[in-house]
Amino acid sequence: MTATGADREAAGSTTRGYWWWERRRSVALDVGLALVSALECGLEGVEFARNTGIPVPVGVVFGLLAGSVLLVRRRWPIVVVLLTIAMTPAEMGFLMALVGLYTLAASEVPRRITVVLASMALVGTFIITYVRLRQSVAEQTDFGPGDWYVPLMSVFMAVGLTAPSVLLGLYIGARRRLMESLRERADSLERELSLLADRAEERAEWARTEERTRIAREMHDVVAHRVSLMVVHAAALQAVAPKDPAKAVRNAALVGDMGRQALTELREMLGVLRTGEALTAPAAAGGVPLASVRQAAAAAAASAATEDGPRLHELEALVAQSRQAGMVVELMVHGELRPYPPEVEQTAFRVVQEALTNVHKHAAGAKTWVRLAHREAEVAMQVENGPSDAAAADAGLPSGGNGLV
């Protein structure tokens, strides 16, 4: 499992609680730097007290307090840098100046403020270095460098004490922001991938549901009509068997033929389903995408259905089967018969088949008219039945609600 940025923030909140520090090592680092800086400023406070004539303990306490300000460098870097600039004439806080400038450059403080404060520190360091170096050169009578020596060395000292810290801070700050940007982008991509996976799973579940519904409807269309006719013939066979054995034998033969036809169509449908399974198994083993497998299975099923499905020229036989079951059916064809796409002919055949099945179920003994019209750009079907014959026996065929939508 991978954790997103939100998860990391939720997990990291338990380690926070150290004021403005996020981690324990940050606390330890800042406390250690503050102690070293306070010790340095305390030692330098002794020399500062001697030069200014103030009591030494006051200079030491002042140095300790000033150096300990480094503890708040992450929270208030501007305060730390301003304090180091103010302490530049006292020649105290070199470590605090270096760390303060680095922290200021690496923080989220606007760049113009960073430039201004770094320039002030550079100028202050240059002035103090220039004054002290000029005094030292003047005190040494045996050392006589040119006029260029003091300014050049002062520039080198000022730049050396400010530029490296600022440049390093700018680099670390830019790198930190880049890493944050990359982390946020990775978290965003991870969330998008998670949403896409959820949506793909939803679409796959919807596709499975649609496929199950389609298979159930196709099974109903293929088998229900044959079975309905078989039930009607069986009821008629039961009624006429004692009175007309010859007719009973014919009805029994019809029931057998319809049963064999139903089994044949059911076998064809199961063959289509097995074709889809045969495509799915090796594809899954070879790592083929699931969408391609489904498309191939659907194409194979559609191809098998197209090759083995019924055609419009079989309507005569369909109507004849209902007539043999005792229904009075008239078939009227208008226009010239012409070939249509296979799916059009199958749909037209299924509509008529379902309508005749419904007549057998719900209007026993009703006279029925089947009209087929071949028009310019379409083929039209109409199936109409009259009232049910009260004298006809109801076969009691169940209705499962799986007919044509």
Image (cartoon, rainbow, N blue to C red):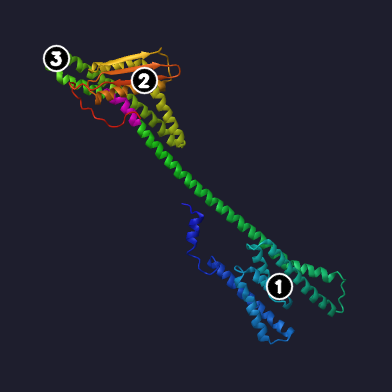
Q: Which residue is mark 2?
A: 381
Mark 2 residue element: strand
Q: Position of residue 380 (x, y in %)?
A: 39, 20
**Viewed as shown, does residue 283 lie left or right of 19?**
left
Mark drawn on residue 85: 1
| Vertical side of 195 occupied by 110: above or below | below
Estimate the spatial distance between the alpha carbons at disc 2 and disc 3, rounded to whole Å.
38 Å
Q: Position of residue 166 (x, y in %)?
A: 69, 64
Q: Amino acid at mark 2?
A: Met
Sequence-wise first label, 2 or 1: 1
Estimate the spatial distance between the alpha carbons at disc 3 and disc 1, rounded to whole Å.
123 Å
Estimate the spatial distance between the alpha carbons at disc 2 and disc 1, rounded to whole Å.
97 Å
Sequence-wise first label, 2 or 3: 3
Mark drawn on residue 338: none
**Viewed as shown, does residue 137 lie left or right of 14?**
right
Q: Which segment did they paint magenta?
A: 215-226
Residue 349 part of the magenta segment? no
Q: Are marks 2 and 3 in contact (CB under 8 Å)?
A: no
